[in-house]
Structures are given as C-alpha cells and as structure tokens.
Amino acid sequence: MTTTSSPERIDSELTTQVAIIGAGPSGLLLGQLLSRAGIDNVIVERKSGDYVLGRIRAGVLEQGMVDLLREAGVSERMDAEGLPHDGFELAFDNRRVRVDLAGHTDGKQVMVYGQTEVTRDLMEAREREGGISYYEASDVTPHDLESESPSLTFQHEGKGYRLRCAYVAGCDGYHGVSRQSIPQERLKTFERVYPFGWLGLLSDTPPVTDELIYARHERGFALCSMRSENRSRYYVQVGLDEKVEDWSDERFWDELKRRLPEDVAETLVTGPSIEKSIAPLRSFVVEPMQYGRLFLVGDAAHIVPPTGAKGLNLAASDVNTLYRLLVKVFNEGRSDLIPRYSEVCLKRIWKAERFSWWMTSMLHRFSDEEDFEARMQLAELDYLTGSTAGLTTIAENYVGLPYEPLE
C-alpha cells in the first residue's frame, strides 16, 4: 500500500511551461507536439499507466487526426498496421447502402486504429524522448488559474509537489478535476441524455465485412466495427436497465444477427468475448472551454454519443488548436490569441455534436411502436442515401470537417 503525505505538505517545487492534467491520448498527444516544438511540459495523471492502456475505446480516426499523429512523429505503427477505409455502410429497411467517403470528399479516408494503440504509441514516444509524467498522482489541485503564475499541487509516491507553470491543459476527462476547478457560475452546460446504451463485445474473430456497418432495425441499433483484420468490435442497442452479466456471448451473437441484413448475418464469425461492457449515450458541451490560464481539452469539455465516431477525434481537434495557439504564444508572444481558444474549438465541436446527434437520432429505436418518428427515420435515410448531395453531407462529416483556423 502506497502512503502519501498530507495534501498541504510540499516536499518539492517543480517548474514547467505547460502543466497537463491527464495522460490519456489527448494529454499525451498535446505533450508530444509541444515537446517537438521545444515547449517544456509535465503530465500529471491520477491513474496508473496500465489502467490508462486498459481502457477499451474508439477505433475510427478522422483524416485530420491521422495527419496530426504523423506531425507528432508517432504514426509509424499506425501507418503499418492501421486499416484505411474509403467508405462505410448504412443498413436499414432490409437493405445496405455504401457511403463512398473517398468519392464524395476528394479522396479523404478514415483510419481504423484502436485508441489503445494510439495511447501506447504516444506513451512509448514520451518515454523514449524523456518526457516527464507522474502516474498515480493523488490530490491533484490547480491553483491561481486567473493569475499569471498558475500551479498544480499533487501527491506522488509519498511526496508532495508543487508544479509551477505558465498554462494548464485540462485533459482529464468528464469526471476530472479540471472542469471542477472552474466556478460553476462561470460555465453554461448543454446536455442531452439518451434513453438507451450500447452493449459492446470485443472478440478475436475476423470482421464480418471490410468496412463498418451501421444498422437501423426495428429491434434496435447495431454496429459492426473492428480493431484489426483479426479483431472485431460489435455493438447492440440496449435499455439503460440492462446488465452485462445478463448477456452471455451466445445471447449477444444471436441478437446481433437478428439486427443485421440476412446476407451479413450468415457470414458472421462468432467466438468468445475478450471484453463486454455497456456504455450510456449522452451529448454534453460546456461553455466556455477556458478559465484564466486553464484550457479544457476533450471530454473535460464535451461528450458525444459514439454513433458518429467523433469523441477521440474531437479531442484531437482541441489539441490541434491548443498546440498551435501555445506555439504562437511562446514563440511569437501572441497572447492576444488566448481568448480565442474556446471560440475556435466550439465552432467545430457543435458541428460534430450535430452530426453525432443526427446519426444517433436516425439509427436508434426510441419507441416500441412503429410510430411517426420511426417512419421519419426511414424517410430521411432513404432520401439522403438516394441523393448525391445527401451522401456528400454524410461523407464530409464522417471523415471530419476541416480544423478551424486560429486567425
């Protein structure tokens, strides 16, 4: 058992330019980009490195995030092992429609490469390049965020630390300390909680098709995804009262087959699950995304339902904005850009929130009845997938809208 000193005790004073709270992919990516630009940074994470790596998350990377990982110098394994996808399928009304991403976006693609692998690549790069990270830090507390000299205090391996910095990046997720450090009266929250969740299953089986399939069915939504050529990730919509332990592998596979087109279900290869979990769905945005010298990044500021594959990608676009802003601040003295962070990020965030909300609204079952809303879902899907303009709209949003410029 690790003992810690009292939160008030400071045994060591540290100094850096940017303090990053959270060692998930957004914190690590920001740290990697800043380090390559010669900007000193320290990462403080409350969980262990093994815990962070063990989280099963998204696996579809937008073109913009792929380019950003290449810019950060951590793309070698992604480029070798990732699966570039030129399209995906929408299944509804007992038929399948392919959305040609490349054809409707002048050649843009997405990359199937698991978030766990992105995190592993970033961790290894940070260790290799000598970046400083404190894992399993407790009592992480930001101070003096509206001053010119903010700091973090935290406990690590029985010692108390004060980390002085110029700026703080809050990359510690929805439940992290960063957003909680902002006075609530300074924030405005927008939220929608959906009346269902996703039951996900990971298995070492070949994917049922080469591309993702998003299926709308009268029994509920289903998704066929993948992590590699031999590892699959499948989801089915379930009620919020469902429990993972009530879903045997056999029950999951049977339900998935019912929701897929017959020709797909017949070729589905089943096998033992590696992991099963249920995730609730919600849309959440907080405004503004900054307070003094604290910048909120990723899930600390916004959540999207996973239907549009935007969660990790939105975090990457925040990182892109903050990284380029800080480079200009430190290298060019452009402190006038600091107030623009929230405005620039939110412009893209709300567009991604809209697309994720639309995908969720069109593909999930909201009622046990074949009601007016269900008919509207089918009519809209039929119209958009039968129109070049409609398919272009879907494709442009799926591959990711362009990053917003700072100036």
Image (spheres, helix red, strand yellow):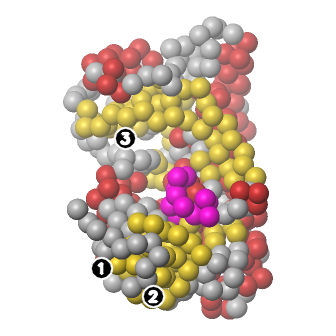
Residue 48 appears in view: yes
Amino acid at pointer 2? Leu
Q: Residues within 10 Å of mark 3 (few under 14, many from 20)?
A: many
Q: Which residue is mark 1?
A: 128
Q: Residues within 10 Å of mark 2 (few under 14, many from 20)?
A: few
- Residue 177 covered by magenta stretch: yes
Q: CA distance from mark 3 to mark 1?
A: 29 Å
Q: Residue 66 or 321: which is nearer the viewer?
A: 321
- Identified at 68% across, 41% down, the residue is 191
Amino acid at pointer 3? Met
Amino acid at pointer 1? Arg
Q: Which residue is mark 3?
A: 226
Q: Return the disc, 3 or 2, that comes first in the chain's sequence.
A: 2
Image-quadrant location for residue 271: top left
**Quarter of the figure that contains the C terminus:** bottom right
**Quarter of the figure that contains the N terminus:** bottom left
Residue located farthest toward the bottom when viewing the structure as drawn: 332
Residue 29 appears in view: no
Q: Residues within 10 Å of mark 1 (few under 14, many from 20)?
A: few
